[in-house]
Image (cartoon, rainbow, N blue to C red):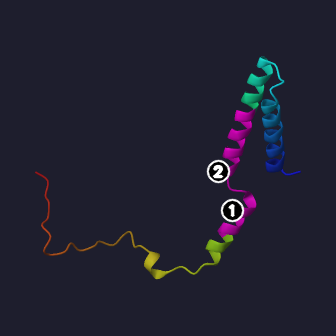
Amino acid sequence: MNIDKSLDEVLDWVESKLSSGQEPPWARQEYTKLKEVVMKIQKGRESIILLEDLQKLESQTENAPQQAENIVALDSFRRRPSDEPVCLPM
C-alpha cells in the first residue's frame, strides 16, 4: 500500500469523525491534532525527492552534452573596460 494513499485515508477518516459531531470534546481535540500531524507529514513528503527520481535526474545531467559557454576558467583574469574608472582604496 502506498504511504500517500494511506495518509489520505487517515485524513478522510479524521475529517469524517470531526464532521459527525458525535465525538466527545477530548476526542475532538485529539482528532484535530491527528489531522494537523497528517497534513504536516503530507507537506513534508511533497518536499522530498525520491531516490529513483534523483537517479533519473543524475543520469540525464551526465548524458547531456556540456556546453562551452558554461565552462568558466577560474584562474584567468578579466580585463576592465578602459572607459570605466578604477576604484582604489583610500
Q: Secondary structure at mark 2?
A: loop
Query: Callout 1: few (<14), some (14-19), or many (20+) C-alpha neighbours within 10 Å?
Result: few
The main secondary structure of the magenta stretch is: helix
- Membership of 49 in magenta stretch: yes
Residue bearing the label numbered 2? 47
Residue type beneath disc 2? Ser
Q: Is residue 83 above or below residue 54?
A: below
Q: Toward the viewer: 27 or 47?
A: 27
Q: Who's the residue at 78% across and 40% down the image? A: 11
Residue 83 x, y percent position in the rendering: 13, 74
Q: In the rendered view, does 4 fall on the left or right side of 86?
A: right
Where residue 57 sits, quadrant-wise, is: bottom right
Residue bearing the label numbered 1? 54
Q: Secondary structure at mark 1?
A: helix
Q: Is residue 24 above or below residue 60?
A: above
Q: Who's the residue at 82% across and 48% down the image? A: 3
Q: In the rendered view, does 19 fall on the left or right side of 85?
A: right
Q: Which numbered disc flags the more N-terminal residue, 2 or 1?
A: 2
Q: Is residue 14 above or below residue 51?
A: above
The region drawn magenta spans 35-58
Q: Who's the residue at 64% across and 78% down the image? A: 63
